[in-house]
Amino acid sequence: MDYEIAFDETEQAYRIVTEYEFSAIADWVSEELKDREEIQKVLQSIHLIEADSDAQITKQGAYIINISVEGVAVNRQVDMSDVSDEINAMFDTQSEFYQASDDGVKSECGLEDMVGLLENWHNLLY
């Protein structure tokens, strides 16, 4: 997984920048893992998964995180409830034609890639 850690002038904070394929992972780490304790919890979860092989699913903000021996999968949920009426109105009489989805974006990476990313993120912040 290729990524960059860059300073975002608009937000006045560091962010992880990746290709679209890994964007949910980058956004989750950039937005939700800003405390040392949060980063360490995820690293501990990964090491426990490697030793025990039981999958772990957690939710943080708009993200659902699944850590298993196969890797880390992050699903960013999207709340479309505010705009679903507007979207249906675009199709006038075919209100069933389009259904707003809350599926969002899903990204996956291997455990080694995730550990490397988190260690670099931790080193930058602390």
Image (spheres, rainbow, N blue to C red):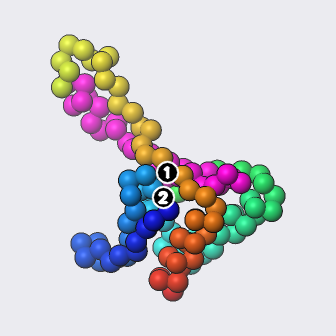
Q: Which residue is labeled 2 in the image?
A: 25
Residue 23: which quarter of the image? bottom left
Q: Position of residue 2 (x, y in %)?
A: 45, 65
Q: Along the line of sight, which residue is nearer the eye, 121 or 18? A: 18
Q: Which mark is residue 107?
A: 1
Are the residues flagged by discs 2 and 1 in contact, CB closer than 8 Å?
A: yes
Q: Position of residue 90 (x, y in %)?
A: 18, 25
> Is residue 106 shown left or right of residue 52?
left
Q: Which residues are magenta?
A: 63-89
Residue 24: which quarter of the image? bottom left
Residue 61 in sight from this viewpoint: no
Q: Position of residue 105 (x, y in %)?
A: 43, 46
How far separated are the C-alphas under marks 2 and 1?
6 Å
Residue 89: which quarter of the image? top left
**The furthest residue to the top:** 93
Residue pictured at 71% horizontal, 54% vertical = 69
Q: Is residue 123 magenta?
A: no
> Is residue 47 shown left or right of residue 113?
right
Residue pictured at 60% horizontal, 55% vertical = 72
| Amino acid type assigned to the residue bearing label 1 in the image | Ser
- The first of marks 2 and 1 along the sequence is 2
